[in-house]
Amino acid sequence: MKRQSARLGDIWVGVNFWSRAGGPRMWRSYDPEVVSEELAVMRAHGMTVTRSFFYWPDFMPTPDTLDEELVARYADFLDRHQALGMRTIPTFIVGHMSGQNWDPAWRQGRDLFGDVWFVARQAWYVRELTARFKDHPAVAAWLLTNEVPIYADQRSRGVGTLDHEQVASWAQILIDAVRAGGGTQPVSIGDGAWGVEVTGNDNGFRVRELAGLVDFLGPHVYRMETDPVRRHLGAAFVCELLDLGGKPVIMEEFGLTSDYTSEADAAHYYRQVLHNTLLAGASGWLTWNNTDYDDLWQDEPYSHHPFEMHFGLVDAAGRPKAQALEVRDFAALIERVDLARCSRPDARAALVVSSYLESGYPFTHPQDATVVFDVCRQAYVAAREADLAVGVAREKDGIPDDCLLYLLPSAKQLTAPGWRALLERARDGATVYASWFAGEHAYQRGSWWPGLDAMFGVRKQSRYGLVEPITGDRVTLTMTAALGDLKAGDELVFPVAGNANARSYLPVEPDGAEVLARDDAGRPALLRHAVGAGWMVLAAYPFEYMAAITPNVNPEPTWRLYRALARASGVDEPVSFDTPLVSAALMRHEDGRVFVWCVSQAGTEVKAAPAVRSGTLRDEHGAPVSVVELPPYGVRVLELA
């Protein structure tokens, strides 16, 4: 299975930029010397690209004029980028910024997408600014907006209030305005990639519809989590989900405020997000943001969102924080491995994402969509802990036919054609694993799995309208037969969580299936059924769902189950670790070199001996490496020779 490795050409490592002299209103009080100083600090830390912003109320004071003084200041801003060998991505409709919405004074409540006159004025503004700067060598790309779903509808963030057809038409008109203005550089929306295909909530900005219009997709990721490993891999999973339309994925915004964490933890977070999103196919990174804004404490948005003052890589005194050093080191590594000419190896294991995430089928519950993200992200965490190069296979796009293992985690729903396709993959020789899940709510509670008994070689013992509750806080599976590297007698202890609907299991008896594991009460909990040349494997518990809603749970033993399934299926990764605390992932250079990322999820120093199927791991100096030593949450990149 091919995995997304698209590139724009150059690899962007940079920052979202507002000068400390003014913040969003920097163009009113533009200080060119301060700007040059700020850019020089970024450049010294490996950053060659900024994302910059035309503050809309200032740049367009009337419906048919631009503020020429501010336009001239922006031209100077571009010249200062060029002098340092840097480029920038201008953002037009701003709009929304850091917990505040600002309208041009003449908007007068007009609808952003549906008012023809207002859309025409936006298009004029975009075209005119593009025409002014299209030939400047410092312009790397264009963005239409900043987080426009929040600007369009602050309370709902567009969910259930914005019409996707209007949104796509608006985007097409503004992109056409860029081209009409002579802009040939790449262009995208700046919406944050929060569409239904990622979140399960339809905010009108459907990624599938917009992917056909833009040159890259730009996620903005600031998730709050309850588990460190999910925190470190959450943005990576979003990047995997954005493998749509073959477009490059740029981490357009990510970061944290120093008011929320220690500097050491901030460094860990930056390091993990940078490297894990790279391994998930991202090819550009623009952190939020360049500097702190302590002197702007009386100004909106900082007066009412004071934590927004301290997202900077550099503090108000000009001191680079630890996260700036992480970006510097990451940029140096990208140059060393020549990332622009690297790609991800094909996957032999697929993580199946139910089409219920994004399709909005009639008479389904909203939780049926959002829970798909939760369980698939947890499955992705387990796969990474098992060192699996897993591809994300969206049911909506068809189940690929070139994998040896298919993982369907805690799925209440899959369409009948989706089940038929998985059954065909098993008949053709693959292993298909599915874990049972009743869902979080009571509407049509139960698994919508047609022909479950025949498919998995069991007889359901469930009762209509009822669930079989899981008692206790843990469920222990004891292997009764070997599976991959799991031996008979091995035990796997899983956390139990969920409400009265979800905290349940599927009682079954084997009817042709082999029982691989039983639970604490001796009931069949993991079964394997021969189908054609392959296998259908049933887990009677929603392991991934229960882990997904449990705080501080990772690593939990689903990774061992996935590794055993992979090895039993013939998926043998070139490099692996016998611990979930260190994961291995590969990148292949077009000249034949293979780089191995070793990523620690341990909060303390760790030493781990990698298992190498063929060849030798070597460090950047060519010395062989038999034990990988990593600091807390550390990353090391080796070469497989």
Image (spheres, rainbow, N blue to C red):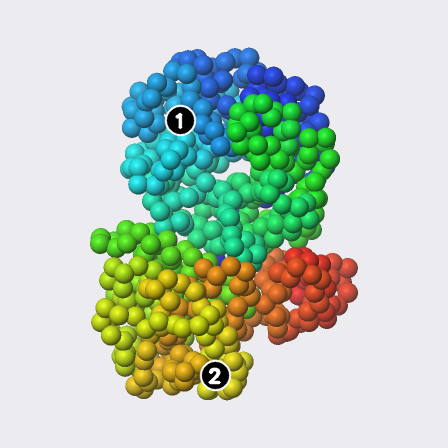
| Mark 1, other Cα within 10 Å: few <14 / some 14–19 / many ≥20 | many
Residue that numbered label 2 is attached to: 479
- Where on the picture, by quarter, is residue 229? bottom right
Q: Residue at image x 32%, y 73%?
A: 468
- Where on the picture, by quarter, is residue 545? bottom left
Residue 177: which numbered mark, if any? 1
Q: Is residue 448 left or right of residue 584?
A: left
Examine the rendering and report whether any part of residue 462 can be seen. Answer: yes
Q: Residue at image x 57%, y 32%?
A: 306
Residue closer to the observer: 351 or 256: 256
- Secondary element at image label 2: strand
Is disc 2 in contact with disc 1, using a CB cutoff of under 8 Å? Answer: no
- Residue 33 x %, y %: 70, 21
Q: Residue at image x 69%, y 30%?
A: 316
The answer to whether 164 is drawn above or below residue 408 in the figure is above
- Secondary element at image label 1: helix
Instruction: Nearest to the eye among marks 2 and 1: give it.
Output: 2
Q: In the image, what residue type sits under mark 1?
A: Ala
- Residue 100 x %, y %: 47, 29
The answer to whether 95 is drawn above or below residue 350 in the figure is above
Residue closer to the observer: 220 or 464: 464
| Mark 2, other Cα within 10 Å: few <14 / some 14–19 / many ≥20 | many
- Labels 2 and 1: the sequence-earlier one: 1
The answer to whether 60 is drawn above or below residue 19 in the figure is above
